[in-house]
Image (cartoon, grey):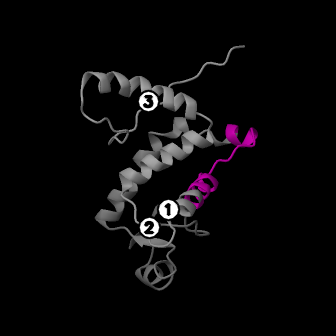
Amino acid sequence: MQVILQENVEKLGTRGEVVNVAKGYARNYLLPRKLALEASAGNLKRLEKIRFYLQNRLHMMFYDELRAEDLEVASGVGEGAVRHVIGKRFDNGSMRWIRERAEALLQLRCIEINGDWDAFIAFTRAKLFPLHRRDVVVARLLTSRPSSLPTSVVAA
């Protein structure tokens, strides 16, 4: 029986390898312990898709250089911090948020935290005042797509 190893198994193979084993060994040991998956057509196709994805991105995986600079390689720390900040702001009591409005509020909070509020207000005024003078329509800051902030140049 063919199986796809999900973990390194001593004297059998490494993770991601397709190996032939006895049916009893697969059904009684490897599969129940989630050390392997049955090598069905769907699982083999998924494995090939993962290999193709990783193979095409090897040039972006320079973890040794990042570790040498003592930088975080995994995104878990950053994701955990983001989840904590968003949770503190958006998970209070009976609050319910529409995704677009939550993103708009997060963008405003990031602008404030980064100290870009004055640049944001200047950018907003430059965009909205010409529209407001031309049309009598009320201008809104909320959009379906966020626009980039202007960059400020620091004199040397």
Q: Are marks 2 and 3 in contact (CB under 8 Å)?
A: no
Q: What residue type is labelled 2?
A: Met
10 Å crowding of disc 1: few (<14), some (14-19), many (20+)? some
Q: Residue 124 carries which label?
A: 3
Tag 1 or tag 2, which sits nearer the N-term?
A: 1
> How far apart in space, not on screen, are marks 2 and 1 (Cα)?
7 Å
Residue 126 % position (x, y)? 42, 23
> How far apart in space, not on screen, are marks 3 and 1 (Cα)?
25 Å
Residue 39 % position (x, y)? 37, 67
10 Å crowding of disc 2: few (<14), some (14-19), many (20+)? few
The local secondary structure at tag 3 comes to helix
**Residue indicated by mark 2:** 95
Kindly indicate the quadrant of the structure image that contains residue 136. Answer: top left
In front of the other: 80 or 34: 80
Q: Do the residues labelled 2 and 1 touch (CB within 8 Å)?
A: yes
Report the span colored magenta: 65-84
In front of the other: 139 or 155: 139
**Residue indicated by mark 1:** 90
Q: Which amino acid does label 1 sit on?
A: Phe
Residue at 70% x, 43% y is: 71
In front of the other: 54 or 23: 54
Q: What residue type is labelled 3?
A: Thr
> How far apart in space, not on screen, are marks 2 and 3 (Cα)?
28 Å
Residue 79 in sight in this render: yes
Residue 114 % position (x, y)? 62, 38
Q: Residue furthest top?
A: 156
Where's the N terminus, which quadrant? Answer: bottom left
Residue 94 % position (x, y)? 44, 72
The local secondary structure at tag 1 comes to helix
Q: Please indicate whether residue 68 sits to the left or right of residue 138 in the image.
A: right
Residue at 47% x, 86% y is: 28
Kindly indicate the quadrant of the structure image that contains residue 133. Answer: top left
